[in-house]
Structure formats: structure tokens, C-alpha cells
């Protein structure tokens, strides 16, 4: 019986260019972004300039984390304590957490079987808030043209959480470039690795000036190279609170070479995604997520659905895959485990029942696809999942120590 022995959490090393740049920053001792020698350009400022150019955004701000970027964007768009903010029911804890951190109240919008925000549900709830924090969760991108039409008609400002879609888009337009602000994470498990870190992009000078002041720029905003002109700050500089969350030069130095390589890395992730997917086509009981032609996705993780499976059958399948070295995360568990989380487990944000969403969440299986996996690794993982899903689905109890319980999946 084949077993997988790789690590689902092992990322690639930092490229040598990033290590060299990091050493130069360390040797200089000037890690703080505003600590520059005469004539020197800070790595953080250069990173912002380069990411703005790369995304086509007018402005960019580098910050301490993706979660900070989300909260900063909410503040910069003027969200006040007590405001309601629409967001995805299928997302991770930092998203509703960012909303709660500014004293606002998340209003959850459902998820479809395509694992994107349910646009019918969004349209139905559009009157409840003036901001949508849209999470492109696990790299699944909804019909952005339709989403923007719904939001524009309702006067809703869109903030995009692009933690899982950095570098990719919908219908030829990058994620982070549809809404008023785009937020990215450069935390180790995302698409560029500085340990912790975040990026914010926008074309709106007022919002970006507020974001820069909020991040802790004191009166040094003219040292930024992807910022609105100084006059934009005139009316804001003394009225905007400093909520420190700057990025430092060390992280920026590590990130710059990685961002230059982003397109190639996205292609490598997708090769791995397709290698897993190829093994799972037409597996009875298993639903693959169809990727729309307009979705220019990057899949640094893999999701599939076991729709309408009974909980014991899912647990048996998880145990059997785990015994063969394949770590799957299940979004249906009543208690969140590790990085999984469900809208109804964020008890600080009371939610109404969403049966269609609950059905999808109860069927979502999720795994990371780090670039340290070879294509052969991915094919092996796919074969193991296929075998174990099939065994449980067909009620095959031939392996007594890992036998599936009698109430296995329904066949429909
Ligand atoms: C990781 C993540 C964030 C937050 O990023 P951090 O840099 O870890 O704060 C936000 N949204 C989603 C969907 C994420 O996965």
C-alpha cells in the first residue's frame, strides 16, 4: 500500500537573492523603514513601489500582517464601531476578526458549491451594510463583474482579501484591483514568505493616505514611493490615529525577489493542483470544484467536496488518509481544528442559520500544496485520496483496523 511521507507545512527556502538582501539590511542595522542613510531608499519603500507597479495600482502600503492590512483597510474606508460589514461565511478567522477589531459586526454571506461567495445571498443582504470584505478564500474567485455590479448598485464599498489569490484574477483583472482596496498576506503559508507581513493596494488617494497614517508613518509619509501626493495628507495628518503596524526593511528585502518570481510560482502551484485533480476525476462520491474559464486562479491548496456524507464516513475517510500520510482538513467539524474555522464558531459574531452553506461547509475537505511537493508527490496524494474515498464510499470494510462505520455515505 502506497504511503506519502512529505510534509504539508514545509515551504521552499528563501531565494538566495532574498537572503543576500536580508544580510545587507542586518549588517546596516537599519531595519526600521524610516531609518535610512542619506540618499538611501528603504527596502520597504522599494517593495511598495514595485508591488504597485506589478499590480497596476496607483498606491501601495506594506504592513505588519495580512490581518493588519484588513483592519487598516476597514478603518481607511471609514468603518465605525457598530457598523455592519458583509463578509464570507467560508473564510478564515482573521477576516471576521479584522471586522471585530474595529468594533464592527460581521454579517455572513453564504458559500456556493463552487466555493465562492453566493451572489444571490449577497444581493439579498446588500441593504444591510455599506462595506463588503470579500475573501477570495482558498483561491476561489467569484464572478467579479457580477459582484461589483451588485455592490455598486447598492453603494457598497468592496475590500478584497487576496491572501490566497496574490498574483491572479478574474477575466483579465487582478484580484485586489476590483474593489476600493486590496489586502495581501506575506505570512509563511501564503504566496510570498516573510514570516509575517501584509500589503495593501488602492487607487483611492484619500483611503491610501489614511492607511499610511494609520500604519504609523508619523510625519514621514513623504518617504513613501507609492503614496498619494503630500497635499492629500494635509487635512488627515493630525486627525488620523497612529495604530502602528509598519513593515520593516528586513521583511521587505526578503520579499522583493519573491514577488518578482510570483508568476512562475503561481504556474508551479497550478501544475501541482492539476496533478492531484487528474487522479480524482470521476471518483464516485467525490465532487471536484469546477474552475470557470474566466477564473485565472492560483491553487496553493486543494479542495474537494464529499457532499451529503454522514459525519462518521467523513471521519473514517480522514483517518484512512492520515494513516497513509495525507493530511486533510475538514471544514465540517463542529469544533474548529488548527486553521479550519466556521462562521458559527465565531461566537462574537452571531449569525443566522444558513442551511445551504452548512451543507457545503460540511462537505469541504482541504489540503495544502506546498511547492516542496513534486508532481509525483501530488499524483501519489491524489491516488491515496481516490482509493480511500472510494473504499469508504463503497462501504469497503476490508481493512478491519480502519473500518468505516456502517452508516457510510449516501449514494446520491
Ligand atoms: C492568512 C489569512 C489572512 C491573514 O493574514 P496574516 O498575514 O496571517 O494576518 C487573511 N485572510 C485569509 C483568508 C488568510 O488565509
Image: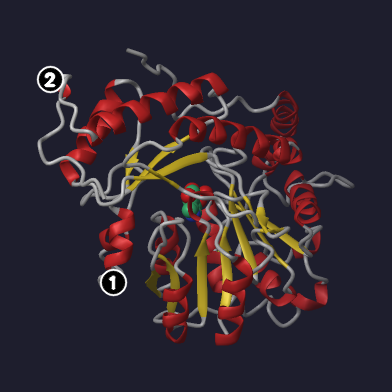
Closer-to-camera residue (299/337): 299
Residue at the (64%, 70%) spot, across then down: 145
Q: Residue furthest left?
A: 406
Residue 170 seen by the camera: yes
- Which SS class for mark 1? loop
Q: Which residue has dot 1 on it?
A: 351
Res 155 → quadrant: bottom right
Q: Which residue has dot 2 on it?
A: 400
Closer-to-camera residue (8/211): 8
- Left or right: 100 with respect to 190? left
User: Is residue 91 shown above or below 309?
Assistant: below
Residue at the (60%, 38%) spot, across then down: 194
User: Is residue 36 shown above or below 156?
Assistant: above
Residue 335: percent from left, percent from top: 22, 49
Looking at marks 2 and 1 on the same chain, the residue that comes earlier in the sequence is marked by 1
Separation of disc 2 and disc 1 at Cα? 41 Å
- Which SS class for mark 2? helix
User: Is residue 243 shown above or below 128?
Assistant: above
Q: Residue furthest right?
A: 39
- Left or right: 173 with respect to 347? right
Residue 10: percent from left, percent from top: 49, 26
Residue 374 seen by the camera: no
Amino acid at each position: 500500500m502506497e504511503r506519502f511521507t512529505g510534509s504539508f507545512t514545509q515551504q521552499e527556502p528563501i531565494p538566495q537573492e532574498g537572503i543576500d538582501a536580508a544580510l545587507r539590511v542586518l549588517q546596516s542595522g537599519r531595519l526600521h523603514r524610516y531609518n535610512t542613510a542619506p540618499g538611501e531608499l528603504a527596502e520597504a519603500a522599494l517593495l511598495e513601489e514595485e508591488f504597485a507597479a506589478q499590480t497596476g495600482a496607483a498606491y501601495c502600503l506594506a504592513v505588519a500582517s495580512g490581518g493588519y492590512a484588513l483592519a487598516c483597510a476597514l478603518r481607511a474606508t471609514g468603518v465605525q464601531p457598530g457598523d455592519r460589514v458583509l463578509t464570507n461565511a467560508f473564510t478564515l478567522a482573521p477576516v471576521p476578526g479584522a471586522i471585530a477589531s474595529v468594533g464592527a459586526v460581521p454579517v455572513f454571506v453564504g458559500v456556493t458549491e463552487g466555493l465562492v461567495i453566493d451572489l444571490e445571498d449577497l444581493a439579498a443582504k446588500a441593504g444591510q451594510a455599506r462595506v463588503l470584505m470579500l475573501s477570495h478564500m482558498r483561491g476561489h474567485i467569484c464572478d467579479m463583474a457580477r459582484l461589483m455590479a451588485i455592490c455598486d448598485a447598492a453603494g457598497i464599498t468592496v475590500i478584497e482579501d487576496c491572501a490566497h489569490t496574490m498574483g491572479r484574477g478574474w477575466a483579465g483583472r487582478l484580484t485586489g484591483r476590483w474593489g476600493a482596496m486590496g489586502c495581501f498576506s506575506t505570512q509563511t503559508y501564503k504566496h510570498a514568505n516573510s514570516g509575517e507581513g501584509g500589503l495593501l493596494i488602492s487607487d483611492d488617494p484619500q483611503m491610501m493616505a489614511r492607511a499610511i497614517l494609520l500604519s504609523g508613518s508619523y510625519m514621514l509619509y513623504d518617504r513613501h514611493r507609492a503614496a498619494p501626493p503630500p497635499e492629500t495628507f494635509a487635512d488627515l495628518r493630525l486627525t488620523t490615529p497612529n495604530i502602528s503596524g509598519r513593515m520593516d526593511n528586513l521583511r521587505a528585502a526578503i520579499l522583493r525577489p519573491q514577488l518578482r518570481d510570483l508568476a512562475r510560482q503561481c504556474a508551479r502551484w497550478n501544475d501541482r493542483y492539476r496533478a492531484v485533480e487528474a487522479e480524482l476525476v470521476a471518483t464516485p462520491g467525490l465532487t471536484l470544484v469546477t474552475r470557470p474559464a474566466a477564473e485565472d486562479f492560483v491553487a496553493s491548496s486543494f479542495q474537494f467536496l464529499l457532499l451529503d456524507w454522514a459525519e462518521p464516513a467523513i471521519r473514517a475517510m480522514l483517518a484512512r488518509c492520515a494513516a497513509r500520510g495525507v493530511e486533510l482538513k475538514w471544514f465540517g467539524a463542529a469544533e474548529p481544528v488548527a486553521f479550519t474555522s466556521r462562521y458559527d464558531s465565531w461566537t462574537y459574531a452571531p449569525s443566522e442559520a444558513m442551511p445551504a452553506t452548512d451543507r457545503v461547509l460540511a462537505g469541504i475537505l482541504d489540503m495544502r500544496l506546498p511547492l516542496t511537493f513534486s508532481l509525483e508527490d501530488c499524483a501519489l496524494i491524489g491516488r491515496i485520496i481516490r482509493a480511500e474515498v472510494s473504499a469508504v464510499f463503497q462501504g469497503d470494510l476490508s481493512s478491519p483496523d480502519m473500518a468505516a462505520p456502517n452508516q457510510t455515505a449516501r449514494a446520491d
